[in-house]
Image (cartoon, rainbow, N blue to C red):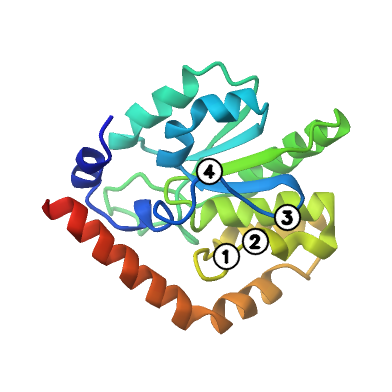
Amino acid sequence: FQLKEIIKNKGYIRYFIVYKYNILRKYMNKVYITNLLDAAKNIETIKNRNFNLISIRDNFPGTNQKLYDIIDNAGIKNILVVNFDDLIAPLPTGSGKIERPPNEHDISTILEWAKQKMKENNNDFLVHCTGGVSRSSAVAILVQYLKDPQKALEVIDPVIHSPNDKILEIGEKLLNTNNIKQPVDEMVQENNDKFMERLGEVKGWYNKIKNN
């Protein structure tokens, strides 16, 4: 598949917000965050490294299906697929859209699966969503919290990540803590100007590729 063609077909910027900066970028203690495009492009590396892959997918795949197929057909041994959208509340009734926010079942499934992999002494996790910005970063925080609560926030870079609040809220409930969401919100707020500056850089890069 061609990057330029996918960009034109997708038609929105969040999908590529970390593409230029983050190809399987490594974070503390073997928790990784990436986006869907990079996950598909690097699928053989993911397979060979025997990652525990948490594949967060839109509730309706749309044009992402081609990339999902690449991941599904790669023969990944340890993969968990969950479907929910980057929302914090349900859409208004009658909107005609099928997107839905994460719920407690989704996040519980992720945490229980991660716990089981840790019991099997398999501690390398890779989390992807569509853009590698919101859902994946929030889930990575929760997985890291299971591994080491003191280092949970170290898995994200607030200049390029903006964790989904609903995931963090549910995660706090399931993990019986109130020490995740507020520190994350404070970190994101402190770096908001840099985040927006980076977003502007990516928009320029996106438009350059799209128009060439």
Specify the amino acid type for callout 2. Leu
Q: Which residue is mark 2?
A: 168
**What is the number of callouts on the image?**
4
View extreme (left): residue: 211
Which numbered disc flags the more N-terminal residue, 1 or 4?
Answer: 4
Q: Nearer the viewer, residue 155 or 209?
A: 209
Give the amino acid type for the residue marked by disc 4 in the picture.
His
Relative to residue 115, is residue 13 drawn left or right? left
Residue at 56% in and 62% down: 163
Q: Quadrant of residue 17?
A: bottom left
Question: In the shown orientation, is residue 13 left or right of residue 154?
Answer: left
- State how far apart marks 2 and 1 are (Cα): 5 Å
Mark 3 sits on what residue? 28
Q: Amino acid at mark 1?
A: Asp
- Give coordinates of residue 9: x percent, y percent: 20, 42
Q: 10 Å neighbourhood of mark 2: few (<14), some, or many (≥20)?
A: many
* Numbered disc 2: secondary structure: helix
Comes first in the chain, label 3 or label 2: 3
Q: Which residue is mark 1?
A: 165
Mark 4 lies on a secondary structure that is strand
Residue 176 or residue 13, whichever sits in front? 13
Reading the image, the residue beneath label 4 is 128
Pointers 2 and 1 in contact (C-beta within 8 Å): yes
**Whole-Å distance between the Cαs marked 3 and 2?**
19 Å
